[in-house]
Image (tube, rainbow, N blue to C red):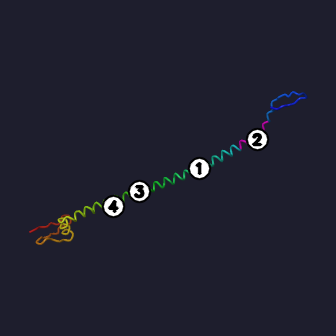
Amino acid sequence: MEIRKLNSNVSVLQPKKAPTPNPGHHNYVKKVHRRRMAMIGIVFAIILVVFGVQIFNAHRTYANTMEQIEISKQKLDKQKSTQRDLKLEVSQLRDTNYIEKYIREKYMYSKPGEQIYNLPDDVKTTTIQK
């Protein structure tokens, strides 16, 4: 409100006059808002790209790690199988009957007075004792 003094001691209150709208000012405000929204959008897009790259890298690292784990599990299974076979062979090599049989088959040894006949591969070697 604006106070006006008349020629007397009494002041009269009158409402302020509304400023005349400036059409150039309205366009300027719209431009500023558009510019701010564009900057916010650009910042938001940059943040999305950065986080997207981070997620992609994390996923790729996870997939590589899982692949290495799978390969390691396969190697471990193979080693365990080899270890079982070797333990079985060690336990068999402690048995004298198995050792005798193994030496006879592999190195073609025979007991005294024993005759050995070699047959084709589809039939096993037969021994005859006298």
- Residue annotated with mark 4: 79
What's the CA distance linking mark 4 and mark 2? Answer: 81 Å
Mark sitting earlier along the chain (3/1): 1
Q: Is residue 127 left or right of residue 26?
A: left
Q: Which residue is nearer to you in this view: 10 or 44?
A: 10
What's the CA distance linking mark 2 and mark 1? Answer: 33 Å
Q: Amino acid at mark 4?
A: Gln
Q: At x 43% / y 55%, what residue is drawn?
A: 66
Circle 4 SS class: helix
Q: Is residue 71 left or right of residue 19?
A: left
Tell whether position 40 is magenta: no
Q: Amino acid at mark 1?
A: Ile
Farthest residue to the front: give it: 9
Please tell me whether residue 107 is drawn above or below residue 20 in the rendered image.
below
Q: At x 36% / y 58%, what residue is drawn?
A: 74
Q: Which mark is residue 69?
A: 3
Mark sitting earlier along the chain (3/2): 2
- Residue annotated with mark 1: 47
Q: Quadrant of the C terminus?
A: bottom left
Circle 3 SS class: helix
Q: Amino acid at mark 2?
A: His
Q: Which residue is nearer to you in this view: 6 or 46?
A: 6
Circle 2 SS class: helix
Q: Position of residue 89 (x, y in %)?
A: 25, 63
Report the magenta residues as a range. Answer: 20-31
Q: Quadrant of the N terminus?
A: top right
Q: Nearer the viewer, mark 4 or mark 2?
A: 4
- Residue annotated with mark 2: 25
Circle 2/circle 1 CB separation < 8 Å: no
